[in-house]
Image (cartoon, rainbow, N blue to C red):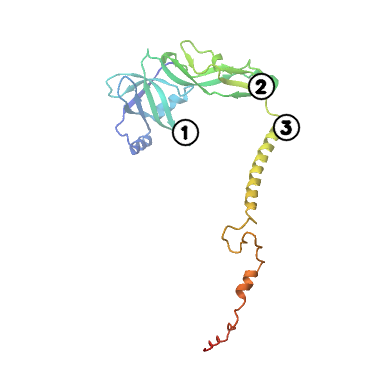
Amino acid sequence: MKSVPLKAYPRTQSRRNGARKLRAAGRVPAVIYGQQAKAQNIELSAKEFGDLIHHSASENLLVDLSVESDARARRLALVQEIQHHPLEGDVLHVDFHEVTENEKVVIMVPLETSGEAAGVKNSGGVLEHVVFKVKVRALPKDLPEQLIVDVSHLELGKSIHLGDIKAPAGVEILGDKHISVISVAMPRTEEEEAAATAEGETAAGDVEMIKEKKEGDEEGAAPAKGEKGAAKPGEKAPAKGAEKGAAAAPEKGAAKPGEKAPAEKKK
């Protein structure tokens, strides 16, 4: 990977409000760290860094960073992470990892494809890109910006595994060599799509039916112990309205509505 020059400036404002002011002024807050020196807060020109990314194949960049008023003229660094605004895509923050020319480093590299797979072109298959980034280890000068895999030979039902990818000179691809990264699969037929849809609807219907049954079982259930009107074991349940009638019947000698109660007889 060829290094590109980039100018940076010391950053004094590190709080959230300070970062907002920097962005409003056309600057991007950043930090550089590594084994050579303590972590340092810096800032970049948003336009200069944006142009650098725009003309790069990926966000894997090796830069010759020159920090204004720094004791060292240039510092070799990898762009470790770029934080983007979730909606607008603007660069919010950049992490630089300082490295040395003779130090092997590990980074994640984008995996791209080239050509049209034979299984797609001749058999109507579907290209499935399973892994989009792979981990590699190399000296900074040997690091690739991306790995490109030719899939034109890939037949239906076949796969390209991690161990099948040919690494550039001086680059080691890390990870399980048996992992499938790209394959050509048979597309689903209309019947299979319909069956999968029907199966999903049936499963959803079963859940609703079970819920309705549980709610329905509560109706007509035996009254709780001690509930009013509940029959004791061995007794018949009282007829509907029996309690109501008993409560409404006046006692013997009781005054009718609108009359005075009879005086109690003297003995």
Name the residue carrying label 2. Answer: 120
Tell me the residue at 46%/11% (across/down).
170
Foreground mark, 1 or 2? 2
Q: Are marks 2 and 3 in contact (CB under 8 Å)?
A: no
Amino acid beneath label 3? Glu
Name the residue carrying label 3. Answer: 191
Residue 132 horizontal/vertical position (percent): 53, 24
Q: Identify the element where label 1 is drawn.
A: loop
Foreground mark, 3 or 1? 3
Packing grade of label 3 (10 A; few <14, some 14-19, many >=20) is few
Numbered label attached to residue 252: none
Separation (CA) of disc 1 from disc 2: 34 Å
Numbered label attached to residue 89: 1
Q: Give whichever of 260, 8 is nearer the camera.
A: 260
Residue 67 horizontal/vertical position (percent): 32, 23
The vertical placement of 258 against 97, above or below, is below
Packing grade of label 2 (10 A; few <14, some 14-19, many >=20) is some
Q: Identify the element where label 2 is drawn.
A: helix
Circle nearer the N terminus (1, 2): 1
The vertical placement of 234 against 189, above or below, is below
Circle nearer the N terminus (2, 3): 2
